[in-house]
Amino acid sequence: MIKHVHKHITSELQQNTKTDVIFILSSIILNLISLAINSGMVEKSRTEGSALAVMFVFVFLIVLVNIVVIFGLIKGKETRSKLINGLITMYRDQDVARYYDESLLGNYNLRYNLFILVVICTGIIATIVPFMLR
């Protein structure tokens, strides 16, 4: 039964990682595409109100998607922590905990914080730069 639980937890960790990668890449790609589109619309937005409105729609999309991604990453961070704590408890019960360095939890948390920072920074750049060019 322990092997089955271990396999289940490690499978959940792998799924968690895949979901986080999708969140991060989606956000960064959207931010960069929005930056390119809005930067390309700068000239038109000076004379056409509809171009300016489209720029604001993309800003709204950037903010909305980045908020969803940040909450998703925060939940992913919490999930990973719970799953790894479960593994550590299992390893202690099986007297093999010395093979898992618990400081990895801090590294994972730092990595999640850095991912969130990247999402925020690319979102800010995608939002501000086109309006600075205007």
Image (spheres, rainbow, N blue to C red):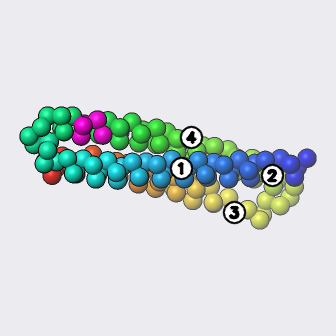
Residue type at the position of mark 1: Ile
Label 2, residues with CA under 10 Å away: few <14, some 14-19, many ≥20: few
Q: Residue 50 sits in which quadrant?
A: top left
Residue type at the position of mark 3: Asp
Between label 4 and label 3, give the one nearer the viewer. Answer: 4
Q: Residue 42's spot in the image, x, y percent?
A: 16, 48
Q: Residue 132's spot in the image, x, y percent?
A: 16, 50
Residue 75 is labelled as 4
| Nearer to me, 100 or 133 | 133
Cα separation, mark 2 vs mark 1, equals 23 Å
Marks 4 and 1, the one that precedes in the sequence: 1
Label 3 element class = loop
Question: Could one spot residue 113 in this view of the protein?
Answer: no
Cα separation, mark 4 vs mark 3, equals 23 Å
The residue pinned by badge 3 equals 101
Q: Residue 102 sits in which quadrant?
A: bottom right
Identify the magenta region. 54-58
Cα separation, mark 3 vs mark 1, equals 27 Å
Residue type at the position of mark 4: Lys
Marks 4 and 3, the one that precedes in the sequence: 4
The residue pinned by badge 1 equals 22
The residue pinned by badge 2 equals 7
Q: Is residue 74 left or right of residue 99?
A: left
